[in-house]
Image: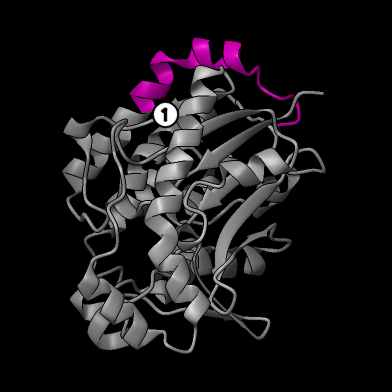
């Protein structure tokens, strides 16, 4: 039986493109097998699996400019650029997650998998949450950037952003037996990640000297990322991957707070998906497990 994965890259506020693509899919009740999310991609994937149209857009566009969400206030108050208590505790109360649908829309054949980085090993771990509290803590871990953020302590271990060790977990999707892949990226077609600068190397080595494997994962990230992009290009040529990517003219920065620009990026993702929906379903027919 053919299995199709959905792989969702992170990228902070660039993920508004992702939110647009996913909302187009939600409207049409289109789901495949396993969904693999990283950082912001995992957060948007949560709203997708819970079938909550427009939730991801609202949460990001309406809250991004608030002081408690991110910025100097959070740095001074919490020592981290993002206000994670606000993001993962307050906002879910104000914009509730449909946890019943989230878990009902999963099975042995359809799993929601969050990518995190273990600070001690520097390796990726892939988590399938089993409760609302579990999901929110692992989403926070997957979003915990080094340097401007704080790690998450879970079950006696320390975790950081999943993008450090596996920014686009297509190889994990292949290992799990998926033969076709829908991939949502947050950088344009010709993007390549640059090597870590010498100044950044010094900061990493100073801040995380207790975690040499984590330092190495950060330094190896650009090369791994670019190799993953090469693999994705190869899969596209072989008709094994269907890839969504934003165009240069709609890009925003990872930390963008401009509501108008964020909504424009969201709309670009929605329209890209809408215009390709017939080709997408021809490439990989929707699975039949989704909750109506």
Is residue 27 visible in the rendered image? The answer is no
As for residue 279 lying within the magenta part, the answer is: yes
Numbered label tally: 1
Is residue 144 visible in the rendered image? The answer is yes
Residue found at x 74% / y 45%: 104
- Quarter of image, res 50: top right
Residue found at x 34% / y 22%: 271
Q: Position of residue 231 (x, y in %)?
A: 50, 35
Horizontally, residue 8 falls left or right of residue 186, namely right
Horizontally, residue 134 falls left or right of residue 261, namely right
Residue 224 or residue 88, whichever sits in front? 224
Placement of the C terminus among the 4 image quadrants: top right
Residue 41 or residue 167, whichever sits in front? 167
Residue found at x 22% / y 79%: 73
Horizontally, residue 74 falls left or right of residue 234, namely left
**What range is drawn magenta here?**
270-292
Indicate the secondary structure of the residue bearing disc 1.
strand
Q: On the image, numbered disc 1 is attached to which residue?
A: 244
As for residue 181 lying within the magenta part, the answer is: no
- Quarter of image, res 269: top left
In the image, residue 37 above or below residue 286? below
Q: Position of residue 207 (x, y in %)?
A: 35, 86
In the image, residue 166 above or below residue 51? below
In the image, residue 25 above or below residue 224? above
Placement of the N terminus among the 4 image quadrants: top right
Q: Position of residue 80 (x, y in %)?
A: 32, 79
Residue 193 or residue 59, whichever sits in front? 193
Question: Which color mode does the image show?
Answer: one colour
Circle 1: is it few (<14), some (14-19), or many (20+) Cα within 10 Å?
A: many
Residue found at x 65% / y 17%: 285
């Amino acid at each position: 039986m053919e299995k199709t994965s959905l792989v969702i890259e992170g990228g902070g506020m660039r993920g508004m493109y992702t939110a647009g693509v996913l909302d187009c899919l939600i409207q049409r009740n289109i789901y495949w097998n396993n969904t693999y999310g990283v950082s912001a991609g995992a957060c948007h994937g949560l709203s997708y699996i819970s079938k909550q149209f427009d939730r991801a857009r609202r949460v990001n566009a309406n809250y991004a400019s608030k002081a408690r969400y991110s910025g100097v206030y959070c740095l001074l108050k919490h020592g981290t650029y993002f206000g994670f208590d606000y993001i993962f505790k307050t906002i879910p109360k104000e914009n509730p997650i449909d946890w019943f649908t989230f878990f009902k829309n999963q099975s042995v054949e359809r799993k929601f998998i969050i990518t995190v980085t273990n600070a001690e090993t520097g390796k990726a771990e892939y988590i399938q949450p089993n409760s609302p509290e579990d999901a929110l803590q692992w989403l926070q871990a997957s979003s915990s950037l080094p340097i401007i953020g704080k790690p998450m302590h879970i079950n006696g271990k320390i975790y950081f952003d999943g993008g450090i060790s596996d920014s686009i977990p297509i190889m994990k999707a292949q290992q799990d037996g998926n033969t076709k892949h829908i991939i949502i990226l947050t950088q344009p077609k010709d993007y390549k990640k640059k090597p870590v600068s010498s100044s950044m190397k010094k900061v990493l080595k100073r801040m995380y000297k207790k975690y040499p494997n984590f330092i190495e994962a950060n330094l190896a990230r650009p090369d791994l990322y670019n190799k993953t992009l090469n693999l994705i290009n190869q899969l596209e040529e072989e008709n094994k991957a269907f890839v969504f990517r934003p165009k240069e003219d709609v890009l925003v920065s990872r930390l963008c707070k401009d509501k108008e620009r964020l909504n424009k990026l969201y709309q670009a993702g929605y329209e890209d998906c809408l215009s390709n929906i017939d080709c997408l379903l021809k490439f990989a027919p929707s699975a039949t497990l989704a909750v109506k």
